[in-house]
Image (cartoon, rainbow, N blue to C red):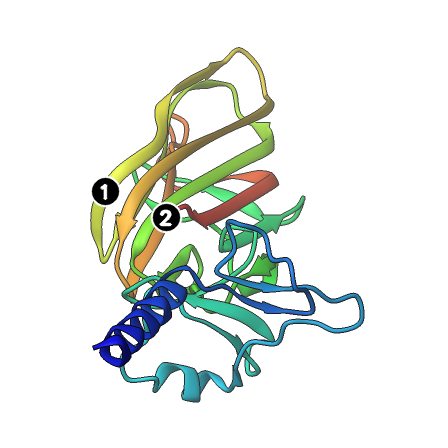
């Protein structure tokens, strides 16, 4: 009877130990709040290292799983649905066109915002692909914020309509800005706007502008570009 009692007490103590046990490396006094603690001044914690193909082939990764992707040279974490780049910045694409070329002034005509690879200044290429002038493909599902602006150094006098619009897969989803400008003489002019929207992987986003010609003009006119900017940021 005493032997059975002793064995029972032994197993109970093992269960109690397993419930409260902590794992520590490099220290014998882990913090009370730590389940796993590493203490070192001469070495680093190294998570599993693998290529992008190997990472994507993991059959059932747990939410919160972490690997070092040797193809991207970055840490990735799994959010329960997909592998996400682990960094402190938001995935961004950025274009900037300086003082060259012309804006086209038509009759309520929409033209693609005149930026492409030539004016690309930054791109998180896992998230965006430049298709053509004013067209960008999003490569991940999520919520995005888009900002665009244009300016001319010599807009003709008179009253005219202007628009900056956004399409997704050919369908209008919103306006960055729209209105009327009325100049008493030729002058600098510009506008910009911001729009948040939902986008899925492989959706094509188009940014277009309208800047109307003189009311008595019978053909397109032009205005010299001062700058054209476009940025898209994945915010969620």
Residue at the extreme right: 42
**In the image shown, does 54 or 107 lie closer to the viewer?**
54
The answer to which image quadrant residue 63 occupies is bottom left
x, y (%) of residue 191? 49, 28
Quote the CA–CA distance across marks 1 and 2: 18 Å
The answer to which image quadrant residue 137 occupies is bottom left
On screen, residue 12 above or below 168: below
Q: Earlier in the sequence, mark 1 or mark 2?
A: 1
| Marks 1 and 2 close (CB-CB < 8 Å) | no
**Callout 2 secondary element:** loop
At a point 50% along the width and 49% down the height, the residue shown is 33
Residue 138 shown left or right of residue 24 in the figure? left
For disc 2, the neighbor class at 10 Å (few under 14, some 14 to 19, many from 20) is: few
**Callout 1 secondary element:** strand
On screen, residue 34 above or below 9: above
**In the image shown, does 170 or 81 lie closer to the viewer?**
81
At a point 51% along the width and 53% down the height, the residue shown is 92
x, y (%) of residue 98? 66, 46
Q: Which residue is mark 2?
A: 236
**In the image shown, does 74 or 67 lie closer to the viewer?**
67
At a point 34% along the width and 26% down the height, the residue shown is 178
Residue at the extreme front: 1
For disc 1, the neighbor class at 10 Å (few under 14, some 14 to 19, many from 20) is: some
Residue 29 shown left or right of residue 71 in the figure? right
Of circles 1 and 2, the one toward us is 2
The quadrant of the image that shows the N terminus is: bottom left
Q: Which residue is mark 1?
A: 173
Quick check: can you spot residue 138? Answer: no
x, y (%) of residue 113? 44, 48
């Amino acid at each position: 009877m005493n032997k059975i009692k002793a064995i029972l007490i032994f197993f109970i103590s093992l269960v109690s130990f397993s419930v409260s046990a902590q794992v520590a490396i490099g220290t014998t006094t882990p913090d009370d709040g730590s389940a796993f603690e590493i203490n070192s001044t001469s070495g680093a914690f190294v998570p599993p290292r693998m290529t992008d193909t190997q990472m994507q082939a993991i059959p059932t990764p747990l939410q919160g799983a972490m690997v070092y992707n040797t193809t991207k040279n970055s840490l990735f974490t799994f959010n329960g649905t997909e592998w996400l780049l682990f960094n402190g910045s938001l995935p961004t694409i950025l274009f900037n066109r300086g003082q060259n070329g012309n804006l086209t002034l038509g009759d309520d005509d929409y033209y693609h915002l005149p930026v492409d690879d030539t004016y690309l200044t930054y791109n998180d290429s896992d998230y965006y692909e430049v298709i053509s002038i004013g067209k960008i493909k999003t490569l991940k599902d999520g919520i995005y914020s888009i900002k665009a602006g244009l300016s001319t150094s010599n807009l003709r006098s008179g009253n005219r309509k202007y628009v900056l619009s956004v399409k997704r897969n050919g369908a209008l989803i919103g306006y960055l800005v729209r209105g009327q400008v009325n100049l008493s003489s030729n002058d600098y002019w510009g506008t910009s706007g911001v729009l948040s929207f939902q986008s899925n992987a492989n959706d094509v986003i188009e940014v277009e502008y309208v800047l109307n010609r003189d009311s008595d003009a019978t053909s397109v006119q032009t205005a010299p570009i001062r700058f054209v900017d476009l940025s898209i940021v994945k915010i969620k």
